Amino acid sequence: MLDGLDRILAWYQSDTRPLFPDTAALFCDAHGEALKPETVRDRLARLLDTESRIEGDRFTPHDLRRACATHHYEQGMDLITVQQLLGHEHIASTIAYVRPCLTFVDDAWRRATSRALTGLAG
């Protein structure tokens, strides 16, 4: 789902975003105003329609937000920082958002069990 997204964002930040220096918004419309969430959702849906993406291969901006939060968490960012990044008031919202893969969960369990066993033996 996120293949090539890093290159697209790098291009946007280097070539397009500088055209709108007077706004704090990361993504702007042609007038330099912040894009509205419904505009982003509709444009993404239209692009996926153009690509004839099947139902299981489609995603929404919310899916991208969730994937980004999960990626940061799996790369070692703590939940409080992810919470701040997402702008959640309550950590419970962030916990519900982040969905680590089973491999990540298995690895975390193995590390914790290993540390506990080492502590008991020592």
Image (tube, rainbow, N blue to C red):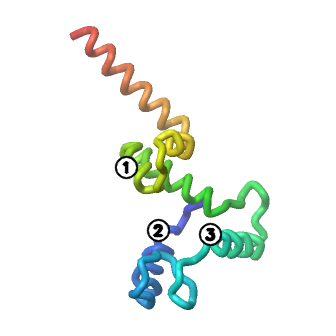
Q: Position of residue 46 (x, y in %)?
A: 74, 75
Quarter holding residue 114: top left
Q: Secondary structure at mark 1?
A: helix
Q: In the rendered image, which residue does mark 3 sit on?
A: 37
Category of crowding for the residue at label 1, using alpha-carbon neighbours closer than 10 angstroms: few (below 14), some (14–19), many (at least 20) = some
Residue kind at label 3, given as amino acid type: Pro
Q: Position of residue 16 (x, y in %)?
A: 47, 86
The disc, 2 or 1, on the residue closer to the chain's N-terminal end is: 2
Q: For this view, does 120 lie left or right of residue 93?
A: left
Give the CA distance from mark 3 to mark 1.
23 Å
Nearer to us in this view, 95 or 60: 95
Q: Nearer the viewer, mark 2 or mark 1?
A: 1
Is 38 rendered above or below residue 105? below
The quadrant of the image that shows the N terminus is bottom right
Give the CA distance from mark 3 to mark 2.
21 Å
Q: In the rendered image, which residue does mark 1 sit on?
A: 81
Residue at the farthest left position: 122
Residue kind at label 2, given as amino acid type: Asp
Residue at the farthest front position: 89
Q: Which residue is pictured at 51% across the width and 39% down the height?
A: 92
Nearer to us in this view, 32 or 77: 32
Find residue 6 and name its label.
2
Give the CA distance from mark 2 to mark 1.
21 Å
Category of crowding for the residue at label 3, using alpha-carbon neighbours closer than 10 angstroms: few (below 14), some (14–19), many (at least 20) = few
Residue kind at label 1, given as amino acid type: Thr
Q: Which residue is pictured at 71% across the width and 58% down the height?
A: 57
Quarter holding residue 11: bottom left
Q: Position of residue 99 (x, y in %)?
A: 55, 42
Q: Secondary structure at mark 2?
A: helix
